Image (cartoon, rainbow, N blue to C red):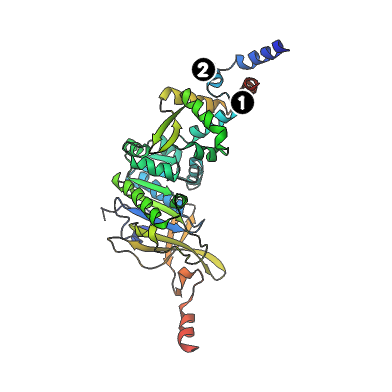
Amino acid sequence: MSDRIKTGIAGLDEMLGGGFLPETANLVEGAPGTGKSTLGMQFIYNGIQRFDEPGIILTFEEFPQQYYRDAQTFGWPFQELEQADKLRVIMTSPEVGQADLERVGGRVESLVREIGAKRILVDSLSHFERLTQDPIQLRGVIYSFVNALKREGLTSLLTRESPALIGEGDSVDDDVAFVMDSYLMMRYVEIDSAVRKALLVLKLRSSDHAKDIRQFEITANGFEVRSKFEGREGILSGSPHRMADSFVEAFVRR
Amino acid sequence: MANAGSDLAARLMGDMDPELLEFLKSKVNSFIKWDLVRFFHDNPHSTDTADNVARYVGRDVSAIEAELGELVGTGVLERHRVGELTVYSLATDAAMRKLIDQFILACDDRQFRVKAIYHIIRGMR
């Protein structure tokens, strides 16, 4: 287990067979509000506090102040960690981030060396889509980007917006997911007139991983993985039903 | 009237830290530059194009491009080429960063802000 980059989130590391593999690119995809950025911030925070692995947050969307505020609500003092040279929050655009990583001695490369960063949160990969409409070109751009992160010795967690609020959406197993080493999916699920959140590790290259779909919540302590959805099926459709009902539908009511 | 205006300016600026007064006069002499200095102070690791900086501060690029250039000229910002892109970032010079920190900290004080605003408006005439 020592060769794993642990998220430090109980339940998630177990689902990942101990954690992410070092120097890999790991995609977290979900609908807005599911908790992708929270998961990413906790990955960075736990890395610094529990595993002495400094981190970088590369944001194409939110201002650093927003991360400081959001992190503080969970008791994670990001500004203090920046002052202690354990964290850097960088806001830029995908085109500049990409060009910067391609050159020798770029800003991200300098910051990685300056603080000895081992982890990076890229929030969010969806912004690369504005660089090109061509899916093949987009795949090439992202492939080059994640390879540059690996070259810097970083284990990356990259978030991506899912267009579907509830249900599978239409982006599963597409070109971008193909270049990633692991693929975590978050979904809203409607059960008994209440919305819950589901997490699935769809892919983890070169490693075994949990195949079941787990419930999770964002609590005052951050991301918490709970038990799997017992006795339900069709979770990823967004509207699961009891297995007994489907048994009846399939065999009894025929 | 001109003398009265000069007297008021002198009284408003008289008790200002001379270093900050000089910074205001020679570097942050417009509201757009003030916005830009605050943006880069709050985002010290940001490196981006004029187009994107304009989006971040909520202005049109045509309104900020010349001001970015002037801030580069006075050493507040740095301009680099990244691939085919021209990007701007906060100066790495420690003395300049300290001065920027002092200016932003001073802006928390309402009296300082009023004086700074008066100075900028006066300079725009």
Tell me if residue A11 can be seen: no
Q: Residues within 10 Å of mark 1 (few under 14, many from 20)?
A: some
On the rendered image, what quadrant is the C terminus of chain B found in? top right
* Residue A251 found in image quarter: bottom left
Judged from the image, the secondary structure of the residue bearing numbered disc 2 is helix
Q: Chain of mark 2?
A: B
**Which is nearer the eye, B101 or A50?**
B101
Q: Amino acid at mark 1?
A: Arg
Of the pair A208 and B26, the residue shown nearer to us = B26
Q: Earlier in the sequence, mark 2 or mark 1?
A: 2
Q: Which residue is at a point 45% across and 41% down the rendered structure image? A: A92
Q: Nearer the viewer, residue A163 or A248?
A: A163
Is A12 located above or below residue B102 in the figure?
A: below
Q: Which mark is residue B113?
A: 1
Q: Which image quarter is the N terminus of chain B in? A: top right
In the image as oriented, which residue stretches furthest toward the right? B1
Q: Is residue B72 visible?
A: yes
Q: Quadrant of residue A36?
A: bottom left
